[in-house]
Amino acid sequence: MIDAAELVDNEFQRQFEIKTEDHFAKIEYSLQERKIFLTKLIIPEAISDENFTSDFLKVVFQHIEERNLSIVPTSPEIAKFIRRNRQYKKLLPVGLRI
């Protein structure tokens, strides 16, 4: 499980980052008004934990929810995760379906 303290919001490069085993996993984003567009999920192949991506997304979504932002997933992997985990649909802007 990933600890929320490990998450870095690199506002300069507009990405969420977590460092594990000498590798960086990241989610690139674009912030517009009260919406955050999650554009690209990058998980290095060297990270072999099957649950890493899910845990990483959960920590990022928790951070976004605390900031009262809506999520617009433009990355297919992130949209797929939200479809499988219905509890995160509440973070989508009104009228957006995936």
Image: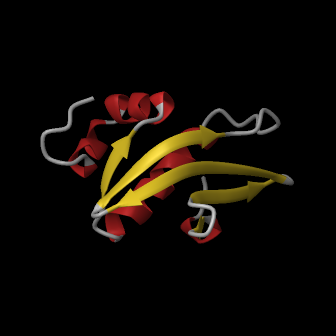
Q: Which residue is at the front of the view, 46 or 69? A: 69
Question: For the image shown, how many numbered marks are present on the structure?
Answer: 0
Q: Please indicate whether residue 79 sits to the left or right of residue 23 in the image.
A: left
In percent of the image, x 58 and y 58: which residue is there?
Answer: 16
- Quarter holding the C terminus is top left
Indicate whether 58 appears above or below 39: below
Tell me which colouring the rendered structure shows. Answer: secondary structure
Indicate whether 16 appears above or below 25: below
Q: Please indicate whether residue 39 sits to the left or right of residue 68 in the image.
A: right
Q: Please indicate whether residue 83 sits to the left or right of residue 45 in the image.
A: left
Q: Which residue is at the front of the view, 11 or 44? A: 11
What x and y, as percent, mark residue 66?
Answer: 34, 69
In percent of the image, x 42 and y 33: which residue is there?
Answer: 81
What x and y, as percent, mark residue 84?
Answer: 36, 29
Q: Which residue is at the front of the view, 56 or 27? A: 27
In percent of the image, x 21 and y 32: which residue is there?
Answer: 97
Q: Please indicate whether residue 34 sits to the left or right of residue 2 in the image.
A: left
Indicate whether 85 appears above or below 33: above
What x and y, as percent, mark residue 82?
Answer: 36, 36
Q: Quadrant of residue 73?
A: top left
Question: Which residue appears farthest toward the right when viewing the image?
Answer: 22
In percent of the image, x 59 and y 63: which residue is there?
Answer: 3
What x and y, as percent, mark residue 43?
Answer: 68, 39
